[in-house]
Amino acid sequence: MRGTTRHTFGRVLFAIVAAVASWLPAVPIAAAQTQSFQGQDAVYNSSMQVTNSPSFIDASMFANAQNPNICALLKSILTSTSYPATGAIIDARGLANSTPPTSMTCTTANPSPWAGIAHLLPSTILLPATGATPIVIPSGSSGWILPNNTRLVGEGDGIPSSGLTPGTTIQGGWPRL
């Protein structure tokens, strides 16, 4: 009888410790969700406090009437006063499904995200899988001339015969012959 009591007590103690241990990591996660920094991920700093990280920017958070297409939206992020001097990763993969929807067709007013920016800071832009709707650069523009320290990263493999998700497609708006 004595062995059974010890065994039962050990199992109850283990269950209590396991329940408390599984609850503790959830506390900082809940705190991270209460802070809102537009377009920036929440991270822990050296003091184990939740803070924003300007090094990774979610572009879909900036989808609005002032940024009607992908070029205007990216330019507004790149010229923002809160854009970090060390550069950032701009995740534009969610723009294809953003609310309001972001057009993948750039306009002559905004032919390139980098047009007219004098001092460009480093950036890596993660482009969305565009499927049947490519990112269109308008005719008559100089296209997308990537500045130094700028990288574009497409999504998906874009091989139709593979049956996999279509990749990122960038199409020049020049007239086809």
Image (tube, helix red, strand yellow):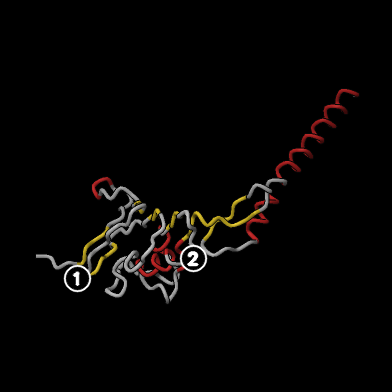
CA–CA distance between discs 1 and 2? 30 Å
Residue 16, given in percent of the width and then of the height, sits at 79, 40
**Residue found at the far right of this picture:** 2
Residue 108, given in percent of the width and then of the height, sits at 27, 74
Residue 161, given in percent of the width and then of the height, sits at 23, 47
From the image, tell me which residue sits under label 1.
140
**Which quarter of the rendering shows the N terminus?**
top right
Look at 39% across and 67% down and name the residue there: 75
Look at 51% across and 64% down and name the residue there: 82
Image disc number at residue 128: none
Q: Report helix, strand or loop for mark 2.
A: helix
Quarter residue 112 falls in: bottom left
Left or right, 28 with reference to 117: right
From the image, tell me which residue sits under label 2.
61
Quarter residue 3 falls in: top right
Q: Amino acid at mark 1?
A: Gly
Label 1 crowd (10 A; few <14 / some 14-19 / many >=20): few
